[in-house]
Amino acid sequence: MKPKTAIQKEVARLSATLHPITHMQEQWAYINCIEHIAYRNKSGVMTCSDCGHVWKSESHLCDTLAGCKCPHCCAELKAYDTRKRSDRQTQYFCVITTCGGYQVIRVAQVQSVSRKGEPRQNACMEVVQRWISPEGKVTTMALLRGMSFMYCDSWSIWSKMEVRTHHPLYDNVCKWGKVYPRKRYVPQLYRNGFKGDFHGISPITLFKALLSDPRIETLMKAGEIDEMKHFILNPSNADDLWASYLIAKRHHYKINNISLWCDYLRMLINLGQDIRNPKNICPEDFINAHDSASRKIESKHRKERIVAERRREAERREREQRRLLEEQQREEDFKALKSKFFGLVITDNEISVKVLESIEEYFEEGMTQDICVFGAGYYKKADTLILSARIDGQIIETVEVDLNTLKVVQCHGKYNKDTEYHNRIIDLVNSNARLIKARMTA
Ligand SMILES: [Zn+2]
């Protein structure tokens, strides 16, 4: 990526002036970052992975735990009972230095390949540089990463060290790597309380925080290392609880476990208590106060759950009530439209054609005959009458009469097919239209 901002341009310019990783640094990394092994076979013959020397081990005194020494190149080795004939390792190491007022962390990758019986082959390549300004702003220079994120060890050796947009991998390689023992620091780090100890924090994380966050500087200077680590690694606690922390300190309150104390404050917030009030945040018996807050939250949660359950139940009942009312309304509407036809039967002594007298009957008719008389809502239609033609109670066809013309407009059997009675039913209904008309004018 082409450097765009002033700081990126400056970093790119300065980066070009850095000396390559030195031979001494590389040698240090080969010795300290790579695991040096001895291949040991069943008969106790040892092979040094560094120089390829082969010797017979006297006893099993030279075991994995004790380690052993190659009699030829004097490398300290870890013995493995293995039939493996090769060993490939990839590691990272950091060189901490300064350049042009920036704190710089250079990350190099070491690749080491051993083939049994041959001297080990090593290669070293600088892959990432983190440039931290005196204000704690980080600019990253790096080679191009391999296309697949799975293989974070693959860097394009053909690419150039360029300004790159941030990717978590750049932080990770800084965390993974051992640090070369000769280091240089910008004076701002010393000014902010740094004395050379990373306190188990990755240098990039520590430097960035120490240069950009006055709270971290305060903690470092006061020697409150646990608190500093906690607030660096839990920035939301630093943002939300810092004022309370200062109040507790002002009251000379001793916080034994910062992480537990922050949890306790989070619980106080949850319980609606004032976290600026020293009475709340500086309890004499902390463990007791912490446990009691925890119990209160649990009981609050239980109550909330019960309330929510009740509300859901009430909503369910309300929905059910509404549904019943709608159903009732539908039935009433239906009756208002069709009740005048109830009891009407047209028959020729074999076939009897009766009016459907409830929405439920429409449903049953639809289900039995596989037709849409219920689904399409025929019971709602004002100018239509549905009748069921039956023989001995068995449905034969379902009939629709147009109430304007008093003529059959549809007549179908099961699956909308016509039966042998089809024409007979139509004629029967049409010829008795006056019976329907009589009901309409009644
Ligand atoms: Zn050796």
Image (tube, helix red, strand yellow):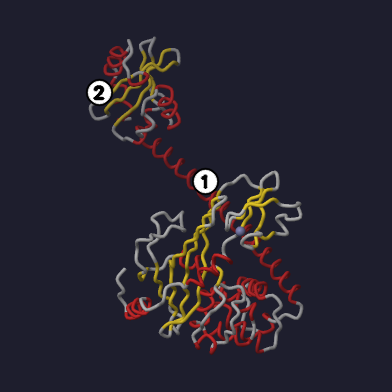
Q: Is residue 217 above or below residue 298?
A: below
Check the picture and name the quadrant holding the C terminus.
Answer: top left
**Dot in front, 1 or 2:** 1
Closer to the chain start, of discs 1 and 2, is 1
Q: Is residue 329 above or below residue 288?
A: above
Crowd tier of the residue under label 1, counting other residues whose Cα lies within 10 Å: few below 14, some 14–19, many 20 or above: few
Residue furthest toward the left? 405
Q: Quadrant of residue 282?
A: bottom right
- Residue 179: percent from the left, percent from the top? 55, 72
Residue at 48% across, 47% down: 322
> Dividing the image into four equal quarters, which quarter contains ligand 1?
bottom right
| 120 vs 221, nearest the viewer | 120
Residue type (three-letter) at the residue carrying disc 2: Lys
Residue at 64% across, 63% down: 74
Report the number of numbered marks.
2
- Residue 400: percent from the left, percent from the top? 31, 25
The tag on residue 320 is 1
| 68 vs 301, nearest the viewer | 68
* Residue under pointer 2: 407
Confirm if mark 2 falls within 8 A of ligand 1: no
Marks 1 and 2, how far apart at CA: 40 Å
Q: Quadrant of residue 260?
A: bottom right
Residue at 41% across, 76% down: 19
| 96 vs 226, nearest the viewer | 96
In the figure, is residue 183 to the left or right of 9? right
Q: Quadrant of residue 241?
A: bottom right
Q: Secondary structure at mark 2?
A: strand
Q: Secondary structure at mark 1?
A: helix
Check the picture and name the quadrant holding the N terminus.
Answer: bottom left
Residue at 50% across, 77% down: 96
Residue type (three-letter) at the residue carrying disc 1: Glu
